[in-house]
Amino acid sequence: MNRVEIEKKVLSENEQIAARLRAALASAGTLALNFIGSPGAGKTALLEGLLQRLPIHTRAAVLTGDIQTENDAIRLQRYGYPVRQITTAGACHLDARMVEKHLGDWLDNGLELLLIENVGNLVCPTSYDLGEDAKVVVLSVAEGEDKPLKYPGIFRKAELMLLNKVDLLPHVPFKPELACENARKINPAIDIIETSYTAGIGFDRWLNWIAARAELKKALAKPMAEFAPVS
Ligand SMILES: Nc1nc2c(ncn2[C@@H]2O[C@H](COP(=O)(O)OP(=O)(O)OP(=O)(O)O)[C@@H](O)[C@H]2O)c(=O)[nH]1
Ligand SMILES: [Mg+2]
């Protein structure tokens, strides 16, 4: 088997596990979000900020992926929600098998929101479906406005872009409107929220986005149950 054939086989196996995961998430009523961005864009920081602001009694949990170290899990565990680290030992992305393995019994226990932080990388994680409801791309203002054009794959697939570290805008030559224009050139439907973990900006809008997404998932699941044949 040549390299291309091996890659195709791996991806098709991943698709099968992702489909199984998606079905399990749907029957558990769990909204799953897959966060993708360059190393250091602020994925963990934003998840920390989100966990601090989730409405009380939200049943949330986090899977966080890294090539090495448990550092992100240690940061995220401080907020009282279950957190598991996935160390990929070299792989530049999470795959559906890793997610399925680390979910354990979370879905049997009424999990409402599963937050998945992917390995820091704008390219590899894009090809691997994790059964999630939506991909969220995190771009920080330190990275350059052209990134949506240079790495279109993730911007095409993401439903939401978090433009992070906007507190740094006075100090960096970055035009947020140009970054947004570039992202919309690749994906006209992408939602964009400007965020800053350090300044606490954008969390209300992001929480509303998540709540709307969760409602939509429930609404889409309902008709299937309502219109099921009566025996
Ligand atoms: N000024 C500023 N710094 C931030 C913000 N968000 C994150 N940072 C800092 O950026 C650095 C990287 O943040 P992380 O949350 O570790 O980034 P990450 O995307 O999770 O990185 P990897 O997991 O390694 O891919 C840390 O020093 C954060 O404190 C922000 O909104 N503003
Ligand atoms: Mg991180």
Image: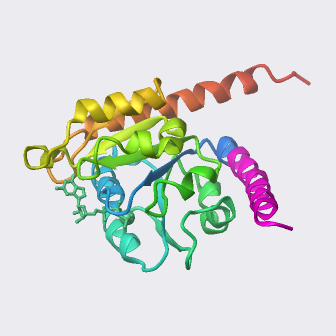
**Residue 86 point in image, percent of width and height:** 53, 71
From the viewer's perspective, is 9 left or right of 198? right
Q: Main secondary structure of the magenta part?
A: helix
Residue closest to the far left = 170
Q: Quadrant of ligand 1?
A: bottom left
> Which residue sits at x=37%, y=32%?
182
**Residue 132 point in image, percent of width and height:** 59, 46
Work out whether 12 lies above or below 27.
below
Work out whether 226 lies above or below 42.
above
In magenta segment, residue 9? yes
Residue closest to the far right = 231
Of the 4 image quadrants, the one containing the N terminus is: bottom right
Of the 4 image quadrants, the one containing the C terminus is: top right
In magenta segment, residue 116? no
Segment tinted magenta in the rendering = 1-24
**Residue 207 point in image, percent of width and height:** 34, 38
Along the line of sight, the residue nearer the viewer: 63 or 230? 63
> Which residue sits at x=41%, y=40%?
148
Q: On the image, which quarter does residue 162 sit in?
A: top left
Along the line of sight, the residue nearer the viewer: 73 or 223? 73
Determine if residue 130 is in view. Answer: no
Work out whether 102 lies above or below 131.
below
> Which residue sits at x=31%, y=58%?
48
